[in-house]
Amino acid sequence: MKFNSKPKSLLVALAIALLLLPFVTDALLGRGWVRIADFAMLYIMLALGLNIVVGLAGLLDLGYIAFFAVGAYCYALTGSPHLALAFPSLLPSGVHLPFWIVLPLAALVAGGFGVLLGAPTLRLRGDYLAIVTLGFGEIIRIFLNNLNAPLNLTNGPQGISRIDPIKVADVSLNTSQEIFGIALPSVHLYFYLFLAFTALVIFISQRLEKSRIGRAWMAIREDEVAASAMGINTRNLKLLAFAMGAMFGGISGTLFAGFQGFVSPESFSLIESIMVLCMVVLGGMGNIAGVILGGVLLALLPEILRHGVVPLQQALFGKTIVDPESLRMLLFGGALIAMMLYRPAGLWPSRVRRRELDTDEAT
Amino acid sequence: MNNALPLLQLSSIGKQFGGLSALSDVSLHIRRGEIYGLIGPNGAGKTTLFNVITGLYQPSAGEFQFDGKRYQACKPHVLAQAGIARTFQNIRLFANLTALENVMIGRHLRSHAGVFGALLRNLATRNEERAIARRAHELLHYVGIEKPGQTLAKHLSYGEQRRLEIARALATDPLLLALDEPAAGMNATETESLKALLQTIRASGITVLLIEHDVKLIMGLCDRVAVLDYGKKIAEGVPEQVRNDAAVITAYLGAEAT
């Protein structure tokens, strides 16, 4: 899908709706839901990053959340008092680099980790690649979990807290602000920040997809040998895909650390990688709009269950019979199976995938 | 470049797969502007030689010169850059991309836009994209695919897919176009129009290397022919001469039990 082929008025309407969204949500559902929307955007950024690796270049990555972790810990370490524990004499108050300096650095570090993962796996494809990337994701998490001794770098499972809030033009986003007489609580401020970053990530994804680089990625996805014979340097382009995807993950992770003020390894478990992959697959691999839809749905689903199922059960049976967390997995599994049966190309498939499936039945 | 020099010169190429010697001591040269045929019984090593020339396999022995430069153990994309383009025996198109995109991907190595070009989409990138698309349209027309460029490659007919592979290879601006059994599975009409296409391509100055089972096509089209058998070159020359070569007749029909 192409945003700029749509009528301009629709785009403007969408922008206004998104700008008003936190206020409407706040009024109708409560402030907690604005926070949920903030998290949903972090997931969308992750899903769009993974879409480059999986959807365009066709490299199945099951450890993608590691790059989110790298970004988050980059800011956690350089924007909190934590390093004072490791180097008390050298850094008595920790490191407090400004967020806007850490962000590009974190993106680069995450991109570097992407290359680090990509380089040894260049010859692997499909399920073999999936196994190695899965291992990579776990290695990063286990490192973060254990790097609290002998030198306390990551504070282990307790995680790092008291991370500096993100500041925009010297205004901390952690406190309510008043602009033109409109009171903007902290979650609203983060909403607009994340909205801007999501828009940027969407823009970059679109530009990449419709470019010489994007075509080369798709060629590799379709047939690596033929791509190579047509003069595509498959090694460099695969590394580029890993690096670009990882950078999006790193950016999202840095935002997460600043927003949350706290990071710990348990946010970066395998199930998170799988969730992000499911957003890509459920929404429609290779289609930006589909991936966004998948991200929104899967980020909201657990919250809807948490806020809907427990009160419903209380009202019906007077107690909670099924835990919303287990129900989430049940529904999730059911939805995936139903999707594979009825919409195998995703909820909003890319034009190519759709045509591909249409005619597989005809031939 | 000196035009008297052969375009491609193989010297004592050998290729071992474990204990199996698929090619041994194969030397041949292809002159600029000719159509050169490579024939031989099944398993003679034609495709292996082809894969060595296009960088898919690394030769175990020997080296080759292409356009005056020596190449040894090169990746396919390096040889594509040097000017060797190929098609595959079992069609290997980017099946889920459109016909136009397939040809556009062939332009990859003759265009430059990187990540920043893609993000900024500046004038240079836009012009390049337009030029790529224009050339791709031209090539589709050139090989005779009249279906819309937006047709998925896999929805083209068999003959069209073969032609699309040729268009994609031509998009790389090759000096040498290497075709691995382009007429396989084609009917007589399709073969005839393929023959015409190959003659047009040669007339445009591109040298053609052809592996083929259809001996009639080879004999009617090629300037010179080499015959491989059990990984060795057993004959080389103009079609007439090769056709009457005793070793070739033995290879194809078996030796008389005398």
Image (spheres, coloured by chain):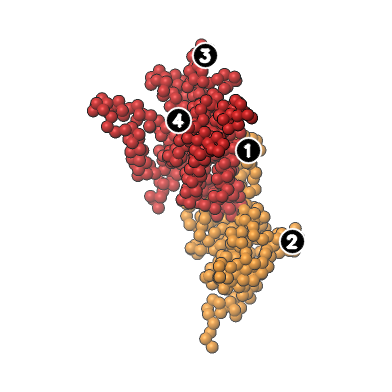
Mark pair 1, 2: CA separation: 37 Å
Q: Earlier in the sequence, mark 3 or mark 4?
A: 4
Amino acid at the residue labelled 3: Glu
Q: Colour of chain A?
A: red
Q: Is residue A316 left or right of residue B182?
A: left
Residue B3, numbered circle = 2
The x, y position of residue A217, in whole percent, is 55, 45
Q: CA distance from mark 4 to mark 1?
A: 30 Å
Residue type, label 4: Ala
Q: Look at 40% across and 33% down and name the residue there.
A: A297
**Observer able to see residue A155:** yes
Q: Write down the residue under mark 4.
A: A40
| Dots 3, 1 in contact, CB < 8 A | no
Amino acid at circle 2: Asn
Q: Color used for chain B?
A: orange
On the image, the x and y values in percent for residue B141 come to 57, 50
Read off the chain for label 2: B
Q: CA separation, marks 2 and 3? A: 77 Å
Q: Disc 1 marks which residue?
A: B117
